[in-house]
Amino acid sequence: MLVIRHPEGPVQRQTIKDIQIRPSHIALLPDARLLIVSGRTFPDESGSWEPNAVIFSLDGEREGTFCIGDDIPALVTDQHGTIWTAYGDEGVYGGHPESAAGLAGWSTNGRAQWTPDGRLPDAPLEGCTAATEDDKVWLVWYSGSSRGGTFLTRITPSTGEVKSWPSPVRDPDGFAVRGRRAVLSRRVHNRRSTEVVRAELVGDTWSVTERRRMRVPGRMVMRCGQARDGFLWLRAGRTWLRIEA
């Protein structure tokens, strides 16, 4: 059931049928389209990777299916419709070519159109969360090396610039950014609380300015955070909370 709450108007409910995958992520695309993605996919008998992304119109009509890699803990779409993914260790080491790079950008017909290409400070092992900020995309991930840690990577598709910073919070599950301010969250799994951390970019370092534990109206679960343009949306049970960066 897709529930759309218009800023001024009624709540619209639309049943989406025949999805044929187990949903892990949901995101909006331009031209009133809906993207539903399963975090996992596997090769079929011919060796081709099975589709794990489906695009629907908001009327519930299926418009396309394709594969965007295996083991996807973090996903976001930008204002131009590119799909951005960060992979987990089973994807990085599982044989899918784009998943092996740790991060990727995809078109809405399933074509890989962005890869890190050696522009990251370390090799990603696990995606944490993702966000948009105007025409920029942020992917948050951590590496598996002894010198590694958690990183915030900002991608500017229009220029090709890729810049990364050490994260002020280890393994966050939510992240939103506006200019030089950011808010990050770390859930207490299956509990009615989460840690909310505010940070500011001072020079070339993200520094924590506030840290607090917040009581929420429902239990926190995996993939409970989504962020766009400076606002972090956290799902706590049946309630969405909006936190501004």
Image: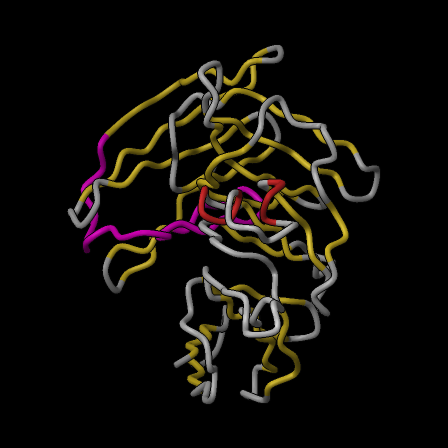
> In the picture shown, does residue 92 fall above or below 7?
above
| Residue with the most extreme top position | 203
Span of residues in magenta: 213-233
Residue 221: within the magenta? yes
The front one of 31 and 51 is 51
Q: Nearer the viewer, residue 217 or 59?
A: 59
Most extreme residue toward the right is: 159
Q: Quadrant of residue 10?
A: bottom left
Q: Nearer the viewer, residue 97 or 3?
A: 97
Residue appearing at x 37%, y 52% in the figure = 223
Residue for point 73% across, 69% down: 109
The verdict on residue 190 being magenta is no
Q: Residue furthest left?
A: 191
Residue closer to the observer: 46 or 107: 46
Query: Could you tell me how many numbered marks the image carries?
Result: 0
Q: How is the image coloured?
A: secondary structure
User: In which quadrant of the rendered image does the N terminus lie?
Assistant: bottom left
Q: Residue at x 45, y 42 (%)?
A: 89
Judge from the rendering whether residue 22 lies leftward or rightward of residue 231; answer left or right.
left
Residue 124 vs residue 172: left or right? right
Q: Position of residue 107 (x, y in %)?
A: 73, 61
Residue 55 percent across, percent down from the top left: 60, 76
Where is 103 relative to 21, above or below?
Answer: above
* Residue 202 on image: x %, y %: 56, 13
Q: Position of residue 183 (x, y in %)?
A: 44, 33
Q: Quadrant of residue 103?
A: top right
Residue at 74% of width from left, 39% of height from top? 156
Vertical order, 161 against 239 (above or below): above
